[in-house]
Image: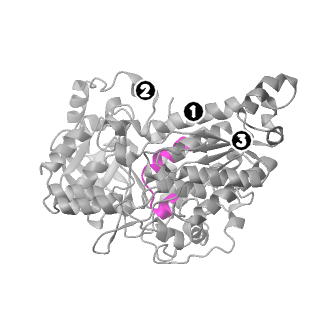
């Protein structure tokens, strides 16, 4: 066993003495040591139940003959971090999580790992660590929360909550109405109930083969989630015995499968940062061009919130991620020969799977659209690409040309939106919020929700070198690359310049002639970094382009 180096023989006697100090018995140390990476904390609603998930996982490990050893991973709640300096610390935790988990796994020589994440950067960070360490590993998330219910019976969720704030500033909702959303939007533990980033990544963990069926969709409050956790604990022992490792599962074909499921589900645009970063750890180049190619042949089958009025609990009842994948196999859109953590191929896993609700998961003959839920746009404003959640864009905004309203920070933009200075037809441009320029590439849920809450989501576009939340809807285009801080074209756009957006043809252009653009570029001076000390300053020096997953060089 890999752990023998800290358990066996006279040279390991000092190591054993420290393991005995933890209360482990000789009998326990004769079994495989399984690291249980638990992201439990008391600040993230999606993580408040992970202690119970960890106990169930550990019970499964013991039942199958292993010795579980728990250690923590950090996690940020994007919703609580939203709209202030805290959001600069969200994306950057992905790499902290990967680095710290790698350190713990290598330092203590575990035989296998069970990862217990749930929220936005926690899932990709642990997938990155799994690829790096490359010992048998399996994932079990904490599950999504249930949708809330308003007094009028309408179901609701976190994206509605943020939009309620915009409605308040537009005079469409009073304080009592805002308070009703406050008390209803997030009714249980779990990752927020729409197809936001956390649920997107948990579903894609299942799609890429690193988790058992149900990982992405079984609600966190359900006992089925605890049973899944116990089975996950049992399954890691089989993976250790067979020495099936993450890079045996996370192959190029598996990433293409995940990208395909991403398009069918209509996942968060943040997956276009995370999948390439995880692939990078596996030595695989997953470019934005590949994603567009996959999107062009993959129908969008689901419209979960914020794109529609269905929620994760509905997707689970309809058959979950595996039912979506089964629909995709009907047009041979997946490689079903890939290995998964079940120890079987994807094709074997999908045997007998049915779509139990064609209203939630549309049959492949009747999709919401013939192409995928995410589009990568390119053009003079974004030569290296930018990303939009096409499935959450109204038909009226699929093509749009309007004047740029330019802001050098999210804070300036949100102040203008709340003050009623943005009008129908405008294109809001928020720059110097990229991975380096932010630093940290903040999510822009506040401005997008304000626009939607004011009823302008079918009339106003937003473009940024930062990113958008999975809870965002409307023509919200993020990840503009190169970013402004690197002298990308977005740095040279000025107030009133016309911007053309053509989502069906994957184009985005700033309608400025080359001579004018050259003069602006010659006169441009990059602003001083906003943060010059601490982790964010180090991150800004090391981070690469959003077009490549914002990985650290």
Tag 3 residue: 135
Q: Of helix, strand and loop, which mostly describes the magenta segment?
A: helix
Label 1 crowd bin: few (<14), some (14–19), many (20+), radius 10 Å: some
Label 3 crowd bin: few (<14), some (14–19), many (20+), radius 10 Å: many
Label 2 crowd bin: few (<14), some (14–19), many (20+), radius 10 Å: few
Q: Residue at x 22, y 30 (%)?
A: 520
**Disc 2 or 3, which lies upstream in sequence?**
3
Tag 2 residue: 535
**Disc 1 or 2, which lies upstream in sequence?**
1
Q: Is residue 301 left or right of residue 234?
A: left
Q: Residue at x 15, y 44 (%)?
A: 496
* Cβ–Cβ under 8 Å for marks 1 and 2: no
Q: Residue at x 83, y 41 (%)?
A: 27
Q: Is residue 51 left or right of residue 420?
A: right
Nearest to the observer: residue 242 or residue 510: 242
Tag 1 residue: 100
Q: Is residue 451 left or right of residue 51?
A: left
Tag 3 secondary structure? loop
Q: Quadrant of residue 28?
A: top right
Q: Position of residue 7 (x, y in %)?
A: 81, 32
Query: What color scheme is it?
Result: one colour
Magenta-drawn stretch contains 273 = yes
Marks 2/3: CA–CA distance: 29 Å
Nearest to the observer: residue 194 or residue 455: 194
Q: Position of residue 184 (x, y in %)?
A: 33, 63
Q: Which mark is residue 544?
A: none
Q: Check the image and report above or below for 195 versus 290.
A: below
**Disc 3 or 1, which lies upstream in sequence?**
1
The residues colored magenta run: 262-279
Q: Check the image and report above or below for 60 versus 283.
A: below
Nearest to the observer: residue 122 or residue 16: 16
């Amino acid at each position: 066993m890999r752990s023998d180096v800290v358990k066996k023989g006279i040279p390991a006697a000092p190591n054993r003495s420290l393991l005995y100090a933890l209360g482990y018995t000789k009998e326990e140390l004769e079994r495989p040591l399984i690291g249980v990476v638990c992201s439990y904390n008391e600040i993230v609603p999606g993580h408040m139940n992970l202690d119970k998930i960890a106990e169930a996982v550990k019970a499964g490990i013991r039942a199958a003959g292993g010795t579980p050893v728990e250690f923590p991973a950090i996690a940020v709640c994007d919703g609580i971090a939203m709209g202030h300096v805290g959001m600069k610390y969200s994306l950057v935790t992905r790499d902290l999580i990967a680095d710290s988990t790698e350190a713990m796994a290598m330092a203590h020589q575990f035989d296998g790992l069970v990862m217990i994440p749930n929220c936005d950067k926690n899932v990709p960070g642990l997938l990155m660590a799994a690829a790096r360490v490359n010992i048998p590993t399996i994932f079990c998330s904490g599950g999504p929360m249930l949708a809330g219910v308003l007094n009028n019976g309408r179901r609701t969720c976190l994206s509605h909550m943020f939009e309620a704030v915009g409605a308040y500033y537009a005079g469409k909702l009073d304080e009592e109405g805002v308070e009703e959303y406050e008390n209803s939007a997030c009714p249980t533990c779990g990752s927020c109930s729409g197809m936001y980033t956390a649920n997107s990544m948990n579903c894609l963990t299942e799609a890429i083969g690193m988790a058992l069926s149900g990982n992405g969709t079984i609600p966190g409050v359900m006992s089925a989630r605890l049973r899944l956790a116990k089975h996950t604990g049992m399954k890691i022992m089989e993976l250790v015995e067979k020495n099936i490792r993450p890079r045996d599962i996370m192959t190029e074909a598996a990433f293409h499968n995940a990208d395909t499921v991403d398009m069918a589900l209509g996942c968060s645009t943040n997956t276009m940062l995370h999948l390439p970063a995880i692939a990078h750890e596996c030595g695989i180049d997953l470019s934005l061009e590949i994603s567009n190619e996959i999107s062009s042949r993959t129908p969008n089958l689901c419209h979960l919130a914020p794109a529609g009025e269905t929620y994760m609990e509905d997707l689970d009842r309809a058959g979950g991620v595996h039912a979506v994948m089964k629909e995709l196999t009907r047009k041979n859109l997946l490689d079903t020969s890939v290995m998964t953590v079940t120890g079987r191929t994807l094709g074997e896993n999908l045997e007998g799977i049915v779509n139990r609700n064609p209203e939630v998961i549309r049959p492949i003959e009747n999709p919401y659209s013939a192409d995928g839920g995410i589009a990568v746009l390119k053009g003079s404003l974004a030569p290296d690409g930018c990303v939009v959640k096409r499935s959450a864009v109204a038909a009226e905004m699929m093509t749009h040309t309007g004047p740029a309203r330019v802001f050098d920070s999210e804070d300036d933009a949100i102040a203008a939106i709340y003050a009623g200075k943005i009008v129908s037809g405008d294109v809001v441009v928020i720059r110097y919020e990229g991975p380096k320029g932010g630093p940290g590439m903040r999510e822009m849920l506040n401005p997008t929700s304000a626009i939607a809450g004011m009823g302008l989501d079918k009339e106003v576009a937003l473009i940024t070198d930062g990113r958008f939340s999975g809870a965002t809807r409307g023509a919200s285009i993020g990840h503009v690359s190169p970013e402004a801080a690197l002298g990308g074209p977005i740095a040279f756009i000025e107030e009133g310049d016309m911007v053309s957006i053509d989502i069906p043809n994957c184009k985005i252009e700033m309608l400025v002639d080359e001579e004018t653009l050259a003069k602006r570029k010659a006169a441009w001076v990059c602003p001083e970094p906003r943060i010059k000390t601490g982790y964010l300053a180090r991150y800004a020096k090391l981070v690469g382009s959003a077009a490549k997953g914002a990985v650290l060089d």
